[in-house]
Amino acid sequence: MINVEEAKKRISEILISRKIEICPISESTGLFCAEEIFSPISVPSFDNSAMDGYALAFGDLKPEMVISGEVKAGVLSVEKLRPGTVVRIFTGAPIPEGADTVVKQEVANVYENKFLIDVNEVKKGGFVRKAGAQCEVGEKVLEVGSEISSGTIALLASLGIEGIKVFSKPRIGVILTGDEVVEPGQKLENGQIYDANGPMLTSALMKLGVKPAFVEKVKDDADVVRSSVERLVEQVDVLILSGGISVGDYDFVRPTMQDMGVEELFYKVAQKPGKPLFVGKLGSKIIFALPGNPSSSLSCFMVYVKPFIRHFCGANDAFESNLRFPLSETYHSESILTFFLKCQLKNGMIHLLKGQESFNLISFNTATGLVEIPGINSVSPENSNYNYYPF
Ligand SMILES: Nc1nc2c(c(=O)[nH]1)N[C@H]1C(S)=C(S)[C@@H](COP(=O)(O)OP(=O)(O)OC[C@H]3O[C@@H](n4cnc5c(N)ncnc54)[C@H](O)[C@@H]3O)O[C@H]1N2
Ligand code: MOO
């Protein structure tokens, strides 16, 4: 059995080969950039007004000046400013040659074609958005591995970029084991339970922008588990199994991995829930076998599978889990295991919830995430910071 830090380290060291594709920017939200982007133009590409008002040369400023013309946004050619005069100007309109300052209309008085101003209200260069203020031509604006948000898309669009190279999402499939597990909608016979892990893992994957290639339920039968894994692993980059990974007579997942020659990266982590976690490699395929209890499955997903998938998707910060918050109460544990507890993050504090058993889902509804309580101390004091994993 290894500890949580060692398990995280081994996952962060898995080598993967990502694919790259070109994507229209409008379809790239949530993907990760696979190239450095350098601005093809300066933005703004011309000096322009930040306000509706009047443009003038600060050196010519006088309490009374003549309004000699008008410039509106979108005009393609603009006359030079006549010395000693002002021009009416609108937000986004080009600053005429000879002008260097804009006065917003709220502080000016206008009488016929006269512009009247308290000169103390005017700041040299005021309300002029200079060419290149956002970025200069050739300036780096995006790093490899940065996540594309609506804001990123606005930035790329402002540079006239229509498509970018992004990392392809991995293909991921889910296999659920357990003879007792039935689909919602079916009648529950004695000894049966409804499948919580299938919908839960699907939802957690969808949140990462990955639609599972399949979610297939298999019987607790050695031959069926093996033939299903052999067939389905071919279809994906990452295979996730739920259940059947413990030591019972009907837990066939680890023996299957051994029979198939899957290289075991680790099995069993000193943690609760989720101790019998298996991670392995078959050629270029990565296999996560998560324990069947839903809390154990979700906890292992959040702590190990999620960062790995984000890494596969191209995120450059996938393994930097720096969310740490103080506990609202002291937590006592006699265990050497690291605990991942369902909690609520409220007003910057972590509040532990009732019903922490790994079969118990009642607090999943109100939980905002998990908190990691290291197993080395028997007392985890309130107000100290602990790793937090948001759902
Ligand atoms: N002798 C030992 N027994 C167990 C150990 C151990 O160390 N020695 N570890 C326990 C721990 S910890 C866990 S966690 C479980 C993990 O067991 P498996 O991964 O083999 O999972 P199953 O036995 O198939 O199922 C466990 C539990 O979860 C329920 N389950 C399974 N699939 C689903 C699903 N899709 N939706 C909802 N619930 C599901 C299943 O009915 C079981 O109750 O092993 C302990 N045993
Ligand atoms: O540690 Mo198991 O994962 O109790 O539920």
Image (cartoon, rainbow, N blue to C red):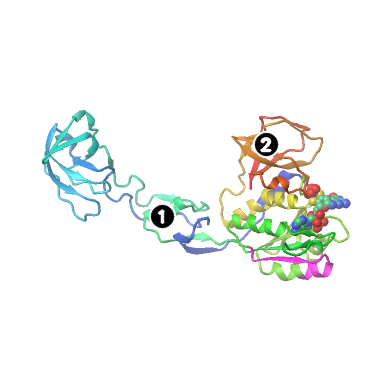
Q: Which residue is mark 1?
A: 156
Front position among marks 1 and 2: 2
214 falls in the magenta region: yes
Q: Which residue is mark 2?
A: 351
Neighbor class of circle 2 (other Cα within 10 Å; few <14, some 14-19, many 20+) is many
Where residue 92 sits in the image (x, y, percent)?
A: 27, 48
Q: Is 380 left, or right, of 335 in this rendering?
A: left
User: Bounds of the magenta span?
Assistant: 212-227
Please give the label number shown on residue 214.
none
Q: Earlier in the sequence, mark 1 or mark 2?
A: 1
Q: Is 248 left, or right, of 257 in this rendering?
A: right
Amino acid at dot 2: His
Distance (Cα) linking label 1 and label 2:
41 Å
* Residue located 18% across and 46% down the image: 97
Tell me which corner region of the image, top left, top right, bottom left or bottom right, holds residue 49. top left
Amino acid at dot 1: Leu
* Residue located 64% across and 52% down the image: 306
Does residue 245 appear in this view?
A: no
Does residue 143 appear in this view?
A: yes
Q: Are marks 1 and 2 in contact (CB under 8 Å)?
A: no
Tell me which corner region of the image, top left, top right, bottom left or bottom right, holds residue 116. top left
35 falls in the magenta region: no
Q: Is 36 left, or right, of 106 in this rendering?
A: right
Neighbor class of circle 1 (other Cα within 10 Å; few <14, some 14-19, many 20+) is many
Q: Is 199 left, or right, of 51 in this rendering?
A: right
Look at the numbered disc 2 and give the secondary structure of its residue.
strand
Where residue 155 sits in the image (x, y, percent)?
A: 41, 52
Where residue 297 sits in the image (x, y, percent)?
A: 73, 53
Instruction: Give the residue at the far front of this rendering.
Output: 187
